Amino acid sequence: MDSSRIKCIRAGNRAAVTKFAVTTNIKKAFLQVGLHKSDRDVTRFFWLSDPTDSTSPFTTYRFKSVLFGATCSPFILNATLLKHFEENPSPTASRITQDLFVDNVLTSFTAEDDLMQFYRDSRCLLQKGGFNLRSWNSNSNRLRELAETENVLDSSNEVNILGMRWNVADDKLLFAEVDIDSTMESYYDPCPGSDACVEGEFCQTLKDDKKICKRDVKECEVDGYVRYTKENLCLKLVSTSGLTWTSARTVCLDEGAELVSITTSEKMKCIQNLLKGNS
């Protein structure tokens, strides 16, 4: 897992540690970072001299600021922000350095007064560098009211934070079935077919009266690892006596099936539950 993904996950975890969480982002962050004149030629591009006429001759332009979408742009932005924080040391600068992900800030506080102070100090700190913090949202009504009066509030009740959905009104992180499926299937599986076991063990099945809906995620209780399978998935127990991989693979191929390897008693219980549910 790359370091940026690790930082993303850790930032999400930190925001859930204390009582008052807050999220904000820098408005047009990349465009606020200028390029030296000597570096601008590497961003040259062609454009029509008359965009309304497709037959008009091309004109050469170049960017004067960091462009959005370039591979190096996140690094340049991050280095610029860190340099600004180093030159303006403060508890707020240290906090943002720790909880900054590209142009998003996600952090939390135990005391609401500390949260309000962070709001004021962080906006002042970023403005010194020519940046504007916008789209503030929090489970603190005080902060939301202040941000609204200053026209920097994200008025949505459901906010996307680093790949997660946060309902600020109920202060809950939301996950849909489609989110779980896409996440589980995004990893390389060297053993085709074993994803059914992984999903069965990871995605703790919901009670029958509290189903996950792709459009309406409801609160639910979970009682251990129980059956969770994809639609029309059929599992068959071939052997529990320790067949070799080659032998087991051959049996599965004869059955027109994929091999699922069970190496622990916990996984075996998971498969047995799956089989009971499909019987």
Image: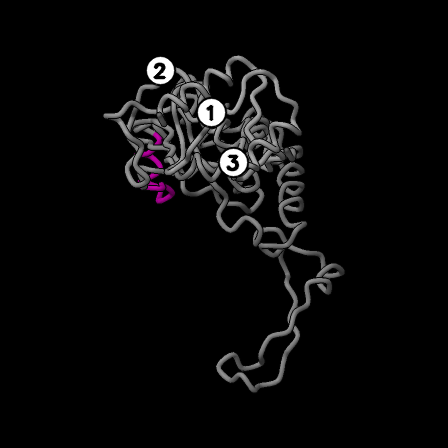
Looking at the image, which residue is at 57% across and 86% down?
56
In front here: 78 or 86?
A: 78
Residue numbers of the magenta segment: 143-155
| Residues at marks 1 and 3, CA–CA distance in whole angstroms | 27 Å
Q: Which amino acid does label 1 sit on?
A: Phe
Residue denoted by label 1:
202
Q: Which of 37 and 59 lies nearest the eye of the viewer?
A: 59
Mark 3 Cα shell of 10 Å, populated few (<14), some (14-19), many (≥20): few
Q: Which residue lies most toward the right here?
A: 38
Mark 3–mark 2 Cα distance, whole angstroms, equals 34 Å
The secondary structure type at the circle numbered 1 is: helix
Residue type at mark 2: give it.
Answer: Asp
Is residue 123 visible to us here?
no
Q: Does the magenta stretch include residue 212?
A: no
Would you place residue 16 above or below residue 79 in this image?
above
Badge 3 element = loop
Determine whether the residue tagged by mark 2 lies in a helix, strand or loop: loop
Q: Is residue 212 left or right of residue 36?
A: left
Sequence-wise first label, 1 or 3: 1
The kind of residue on which mark 3 rests is Glu
> In the rendered view, would you say 200 is above or below 2?
above
Q: Which percent across, then down, holds residue 2?
A: 65, 35
**Of labels 1 and 3, the one closer to you:** 3
* Residue that numbered label 3 is attached to: 255
Residue at left offset 60%, top offset 30% = 6
The residue wearing badge 2 is: 223
1 or 2: tag closer to the N-terminus: 1
